[in-house]
Image: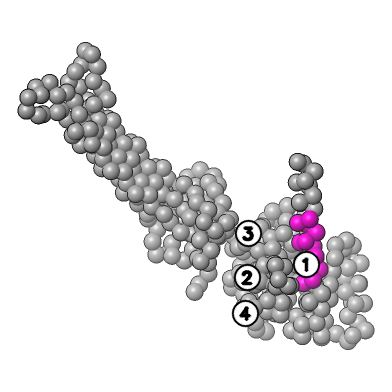
Amino acid sequence: MKFVDEAIIRVYAGNGGNGCVSFRREKFIPLGGPDGGDGGGGGSVWLSADEGINTLVDFRHQRVYRAPRGENGMGRQMAGKGGEDTMIRVPVGTVVINVDTDEEIGDLTTHGQRLLVAQGGHGGLGNVHFKTSVNRSPRRAVPGSDGEERELKLELKVLADVGLLGFPNAGKSTLIRAVSAATPKVADYPFTTMQPHLGVVRIETDHSFVIADIPGLIEGAAEGAGLGIQFLKHVARTRLLLHVVDIAPLDGETDPVAEIRTIEKELKGFDPKLLKRPRWLVFNKIDLLAPEEREKTAKAIVRKLKWKQPWYIVSAIAREGTWPLCLDIQRFFDEQKLAAEEAVERAE
């Protein structure tokens, strides 16, 4: 199925039913008085996060959603039936934006979470509410109010603990294949990854994390070049970024240092906060270098960058060095969790 991570829909909540003008007409009760009932409320439109849905592709085929209106009030003080709410299922990780105001309405990040996006109209009052001592036969009722109408932009941001960054053909897809059960396409040409892929890395029972293979970035991605502008937003939720670098480019001319700095520039252009997120360097394809040159080459790049964060040398295709990397990632998340728990205890 084609991955779709953006869609625009229009939602219409139901109008409220009108109040009723009615009078009690029964034998032997000449002065029955008003008995018009209230109108029912209109149905509202909700979004519900469902982990069984992976894309927004369904919204390419159905773009308009309407909730039913409330029924009008009736005599004998009978209220109209309210319209049923309309529930729209969306993937977990969907951000909802009001197109008219460009305001973020909500962010659905957990399974079963619901978000009200259009409130149904209120039912109108029947004439029974307007009886007074000086107006015993009111012929007044209130019509139901209109339901809300909105145009919404849905954006899907994948939920992952680790995001893979890097130029096309850096070996990100091979790496996620090596450490998880995910099977993204792998080939010897750029842009084989056309959509994000998620993989679960299981260290042991109750110890695992989710890793996302983000399509390769190129210079100008933050301004719309290549595929990057469509997928840079997917790294926004990750807690750790792995910057995958081809340590032995086949053309012999590509400079890994320049590529790393280019990716940093694109991250800064898209969201400067991403540069402050933990980001580890992963030098891939060390199998193309002689054993004695691997660490030497990596250290030379680290010195040029003045890199302060962790770095690793791996061969994803040979699965060399990938398991120690995964163990360190799990240890990093465990330490984060412990620190958060201790902070909560101190606050209490």
| Residue 48 seen in the figure | yes
Neighbourhood count class around disc 3 (C-alpha, 10 Å): few under 14, some 14–19, many 20 upward: some
Neighbourhood count class around disc 1 (C-alpha, 10 Å): few under 14, some 14–19, many 20 upward: many
**Could you say which is closer to the camera, residue 248 or residue 143?**
143
Q: Residue at x 32, y 46 (%)?
A: 83
Q: Residue 130 location, x and y as percent?
A: 25, 22
SS for dot 2: strand
Residue that mark 1 sits on: 329
Residue that mark 3 sits on: 233
- Which label's residue is closer to the chain start, 1 or 4? 4
Q: Residue 192 location, x and y as percent?
A: 62, 78
Residue interval drawn in magenta: 326-338
**Could you say which is closer to the camera, residue 305 or residue 63?**
63
Q: CA distance from mark 3 to mark 1?
A: 22 Å
- Which label's residue is closer to the chain start, 2 or 4? 4
Q: CA distance from mark 2 to mark 3?
A: 15 Å
Q: Amino acid at mark 2?
A: Leu
Q: Amino acid at mark 4?
A: Thr
**Residue 198's disc number:** 2
Q: Residue at x 49, y 49 (%)?
A: 115
SS for dot 4: loop
**Majority secondary structure of magenta residues:** helix
Residue 178: image quadrant is bottom right
Residue at the limit of the structure toward the top, as seen here? 134
Identify whether 301 is placed above or below 347: below
Residue 159: image quadrant is bottom right
Residue that mark 4 sits on: 183
